[in-house]
Every structure is written in C-alpha cells, then in structure tokens.
Amino acid sequence: MFFPTLSFFMRLRASLFLFFSLKIVAIALAFQTKSQTDSLIACLKKYENQQDTQYVNLLNLLAFELRNTDNQKALAYGLEAEKLAEKLNYTKGLMKAKSHLGWIFYRRDDTQNSFSYATQALQMAEKLGDIEEQINNLNTIGTTFSDQKEYDLSIKHLQEAIQLSNANKFPYLYSRSYNNLAYAYIEKNELDSALFYTEKAIEIGKNNNFPYTTGFALRNLGDIYVKKQKYEKALEAYQQVVSYAKEYENNFMLISTYTKIASIYFQTKQDKPSLEYLFKSIEIGKKYYFPYELHVAYRLLSDLYQRKQDIKNAFYYQNLYIQLRDSIYQIEKQTYLVENEFSKKEKQTLSEENITKQAEIIKKNTWLVVTLFLLFATTIFALLLFRNMNQKKEAYKIVLRQRNEIAAQNEKITQQTKHLQQLNQTKDKILAIIGHDFRSPIASLQNSLELFENQNIDTENMLRIAKELGKNIGIVQNTLDSLLHWAYAQMDGLRTQKEVFDIQKVIMELHKFFALDLLKKDIALDCQVTPHTLVYADPDQVILILRNLIANAIKFTPKNGKITLWTKEKQEERLICVSDTGIGIDKEKIKTLFVIDKSTSTKGTEGEKGTGLGLLLCKEFVEKNGGTIWVESEIGVGTDFYFTLPLPVQKEILSTEMDKSPLTLQDIA
C-alpha cells in the first residue's frame, strides 16, 4: 500500500500551482499586455529548474505572445521549447514549438525555415488530430506562398483553413484565415474578392471582440483603399489600426501600419508627417527586429530625401536599405544573382559612364562563368582520355614482353581488349551526356550574349533572361557535380571514410532540404526511421545516396503522392528502403538503371531534368561502403529502392565521438 509523504504533497502542490497558473495566463493572452508578459517571465524564472512538460508549455506561451511584439525574444523562447520538448519526447509541446517557430521565421522573412517548421508542425498536428494547430500552420504556409507570389497555392491552403475553422466552430481562426485570404487577393490585385473577405473578417472580429484580427482586417481595408487611390479613407482605416496596436502592444501591427501611413503621405507629397512616421517605424524595427518593414522604411526615407535634394541623407538611407535587403534575400537565395532593381528616378540620376561600366562588369562576369565551365569540361575529358591512353600503353607492353607465351596469354589479351572497348564505350557515353545536357544551356547563353553585345534588349527583359540563365547554369553545375563525383570514384580519388552515425538524423535534414519541392507537388514524405538507427559507413557518401534516391522519388511521383523511408536490421547489415507511389519503371528500363547510358535520363512528372548519373553514383558509393543496391517496381503503382549498409560493431560504437556536431542543411548542400 502507498503512503504519501510530506515531500510528495509538496511536489503535488507545486505542480498543481504551475498548471493552474498556465491556464490563467493562457486565457489572459488574448489581450497581450505587458503585465501578462511580465507575469509569464516571472513564472518561467520561478520554475526554470523544473524542466518538465509544463515548463515547455510555459515557453510556448511566451513564444506565442511575443511573436508579433518582440521577435528576437519569441525566437529564443521557441527554440528553447523545441529543444526541451525533443529531449523529453513531448510530442504535443514539440508540435506547438514548431508551429510558433514557423510564424516567427515568417515575420523574420526567413521563408525556408518558415516552410520547414510549418510543414513539420502540420504533419504532427494531423497525426495528433489537433485541428486548431492544423489551421494555424495552413495559415503560415498560405501567407508564405502569397509573399512568393504563388497565389493559387496560397489560396488553396487558406481556403482549407477556412473550411476547418467553420466546421469546428473556431471563430478566431475563421477571422484570421479570412484576413490572410484577403491579403492574398490584395497581392493578386483582385480587389473585389479582397474586400469581400476583409469585411467578413471585420464582422467576425468585432462581434467576438477579437482586437488582433479586427486590427489586421482594418489594415487590409486600408491597403485596398490605397490601391483604389482613396487615400483619405485609407488613412482613416490605418489610424484605427494604430489604436488597436497601441492598446494591445502589437509591435508588428504598429510598425507595418506606420510604414503604410508614411507611404501615403509620401505619395501625396506631405514630407513632414511622412518623416515622422518613418522614424517611428525605424525605432520599432531596430528594437524588435522586423527586417522587411525596416528595409521598406529605409527605402522610403531615401526617396523622400532625394526628392528634397538632400543627397547626403538620401545616400545614407539608400545604403542601409541595400544592406538590409541583401541580408533578407541571402536567407532565401543560394545563388549569386546581382540585385539591380532601382527606381525610375534613381535610374535617371545615373550617368552614361556608370551605365557603360556596369554593362562591362556584367560582360566580364558572364565570360568568366563561360571560361570556368569550359575549363571544367576540358579537365574531365582530359582525365578520362589520359587514363584510357595509359591503359592502352600498359596492354601493349604486356603483349611485347610475353610474346613467347602467346598461348598462355591469349585469354588475358582478350580480356584486356574487352576492357578497353568498355572504356571507349564509357567515354563515348560520357561525351554524349555532356553534349546532350550542355548544348541547350550553352546555346541559350550564346544567344543572350549576342543580345547583350548588340544592346537590343531592355532592362526588364535582360533581368528575365539573366534569371533563366541562372537556371541553365544550375543544370550545368548539377551535371558537372555528378560527372566529377563519378570520375573521382572511377580513379579512386574519392576515399571512403567510414564512421558510426545516426542515419535518422541524415533523413530528417534531407526532409528539410526537400521541403519546398515536396510542397510544390503536394507530396508527403513519411520517415518511419526511429532515432539512434546506427550504421557504419561514410556519412558524406550516404547523404549523396539518399539525396539522389529521394530526388528521383520526388521527380517521378505525381502530385498528392507519398514517399516512405524505412529500415530493417538483417544479421550484420541494415536494409534501407526509399519507397514511392510514382509512375513506376518497366522491366526493360530496370536492367539499365545502374549502367551508364546516354539515354538513361528521363524527365519527371513535371518535366524535371536530370543527368542520368545519379543512380550510377548510388551504386558506386553503396558498393564502396560494403553494401548492395537493387530496385523493385510496378508500372502505375510505384517504385522501391533498396540498399544495405554494414552495422557497427561494439568497439566502433564505443569509439564514436558522442559530442560531434549534428548534420545540417549546409552539409547536405
């Protein structure tokens, strides 16, 4: 029989106090005032040594409350909640943390992390049956698509959020989803639809006393009036938003509205009030880190001072704008496209000499890219040719040296001849791949250069062509990367360095890496691999194997498909499977999958291109790690790629450095 002790009652009292404190604070969060924030922080300090699920809940409440008020602090609390929830294996707390982080990163204009966290949280919410969090993350994904000008995808996710909100009687989320849908239609310039959903949001917000959604709905209303050039009505709506934002201390609502008011005064040539509101925006943006609104304010200030012919201040704020803009886009972009989008008035101030110099720099950079590309291609060809010639010379010396033993050496000579023929065939196929994959990008580049040299193209089309050239160079880069990996493997230039590592971490990082590709095709990636699934292999080569197999699965799986990864332990090795519900592979094609062939590459379901070398590299690296690879497929049903890797023995596990830094997206890319 259990007899409770004094210490038991003391711990029980503490737990109950914390539980009811969190409930009371959660109810108060709807009003989001500084006193509640201070109360939460005080409660956090009081129970920081407890480090349990209730502490995770408290961190999540702080991250939620501060996400539109103090972005920096909200991010810190969200990351701490995520880390502790993972440590405690607290699934619900982890889902909440990822959900909040998705919106926090959206406010920081970090699209990649916003997508990654929101999609993970959405999948977890679906498994847990948490409708409310499903709606929140559909809103995050939808608004992010709006900012990327993917309006159809945005509207699809937001309409799904509205349907769930209505079906489950969530008026607050109903109003919020209407707001975000109205925002998408404003960005799409469909103002009648935007006005309809804005009025819906205002009605629900006022009837239910939701200051947050009412404020943002009024801000949407002001945006609509601005697009209709009804500036007086827009200012009236924005001033109401300022009142809401100040009363409930919503700093993001405040800075975004200040910037919009300043923009109206700027357009109507009222410089003094425009300056006042811009400086207010900058003060909030610096203090609470709202980079997008801050860089908009810098741009407006630069334009305003330029109009006032204050060149010093105009140049100063133009520099701040450019620096902040570059830092924002550096988070999302992994290419080096040059940002040359200046306003029309800025273009008029540029001299003919500066324009000529800029064109010369672009030409030089373009020729540099072309030269490097040709150098890489020539190097690969020379390496293969040199290897082939050396093998021919060695075979000829053997024949001369063993002339008296012709009978005994006939078989060896025949084998060598066959080997040389295979090398020549391989060389021809490599050249065919180079010719096929490089011809179109080079032709496009040559045509574009002719246009640039003749100056028969305006700036808008030049930027559009530059963007297309960037895609073509990306294709060439992927081809070169695959060719270099294959060449190094053939020449034993790529050494296999085995170690013990957790393959589940590799898969989760790859999940983040492919998050955008999965979302664009509505493909679900189900990782059934549990943590601490150890293998003994070269981690860099395993990353390349899995990256190629997952990329192929995405490429040949149609929309709304599914990709599943699982493992199974077999004696002294581990079986890994990448399964998809794609279009499948016919039996004749399977026979040539792991053989280099100029006709191996096939376009995906959305026309995606490949080099045809990915599976050849997979086979090469699997075998270098002591495993085997094979495929099973059925047309119209899907494809399963299997490969094996050695299991670590006990001494290898003990020698592994447990404090080694985990893999990141930068390691994969």
Image: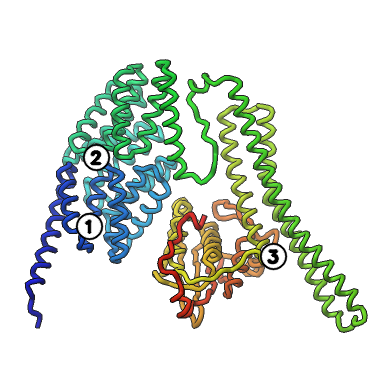
User: How many marks overall?
Assistant: 3
Q: Tag 1 or tag 2, which sits nearer the N-term? A: 1
Tell me: residue 277, above or below residue 585. Answer: above
Q: CA distance from mark 2 to mark 1?
A: 24 Å
Mark 1 sits on what residue? 57
Name the mark on residue 491.
3
Q: Which quadrant of the figure contains the N terminus?
A: bottom left
Q: Residue at x 89, y 83 (%)?
A: 407
Q: Amino acid at mark 3?
A: Met
Q: Quadrant of residue 509?
A: bottom left
Are the residues at dot 1 and dot 3 in contact (C-beta closer than 8 Å)? no
Q: Nearer the viewer, mark 2 or mark 3?
A: 3
Tell me: residue 132, above or below residue 527. Answer: above
Mark 2 sits on what residue? 213
Spot occupied by residue 255 in the image (x, y as percentages of width and height):
29, 33
Quick one: SS at disc 2? helix
Q: Tag 3 or tag 2, which sits nearer the N-term? A: 2
Q: Is residue 583 left or right of residue 234?
A: right
Q: Amino acid at mark 1?
A: Asn
Tell me: residue 360, above or below residue 129. Answer: above
Q: Is residue 344 left or right of residue 304?
A: right
Q: Is residue 12 left or right of residue 452?
A: left
Q: CA distance from mark 1 to mark 3?
A: 55 Å
